[in-house]
Image (cartoon, grey):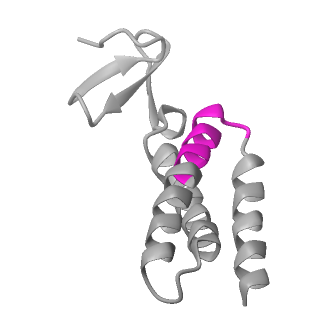
Amino acid sequence: MKKTWIALAGAGLLTAACSSDPAVTRGAATGAAVGAIAGGVIGNNVGDGDAGTGAAIGAAVGAVAGAANANRNNDVNRRQYYDQGSGRYYYYDARTGYYYWENGQRRY
């Protein structure tokens, strides 16, 4: 059983490492680190007291959650619109509630 969890954790980390976007890779690495620490603490204090298994499970879950969060917040995946009058693309930023040109300037 322990080998299965270690294999799953390794597969999750390798999958996250294959991302071409540095923000997603950084989010996955951060999530894996935080998840490993939390999983180790929880695994040591709960159940049979195996901190290694808890750390492996926490790292796998943290890597997936960190990559998903970074991908969700990534501006590269935003929908762009085309303004025929100016011949430029713009996008809507839901965090600020404003429209922006492709170069980041606010569109008025």
| Left or right: 92 as drawn, with respect to 77 | left
Residue 87 visible to an observer of this rendering: yes
Residue 21: x and y, percent?
A: 66, 36
Which quadrant of the rendered structure holds the N terminus? bottom right
Residue 93 in the figure: left or right of residue 51 = left
**Residue span colored magenta:** 20-31
Determine the residue positioned at 59% across, 66% down: 55
Q: Tell me where residue 67 appears, x and y as whole percent.
A: 56, 51
Residue drawn at the location 39% of the way across and 28% of the way down: 91
Is residue 94 positioned above or below 72 on the image? above
> What's the residue at 59%, 61% (across, down)?
59
- Judged by its main secondary structure, the magenta piece is helix
> Total label count?
0
Q: Residue visible at 63% across and 76% down?
A: 53
Q: In which quarter of the image is residue 76?
A: top right
**Magenta stretch encompasses residue 11:** no
Q: Quadrant of the C terminus?
A: top left
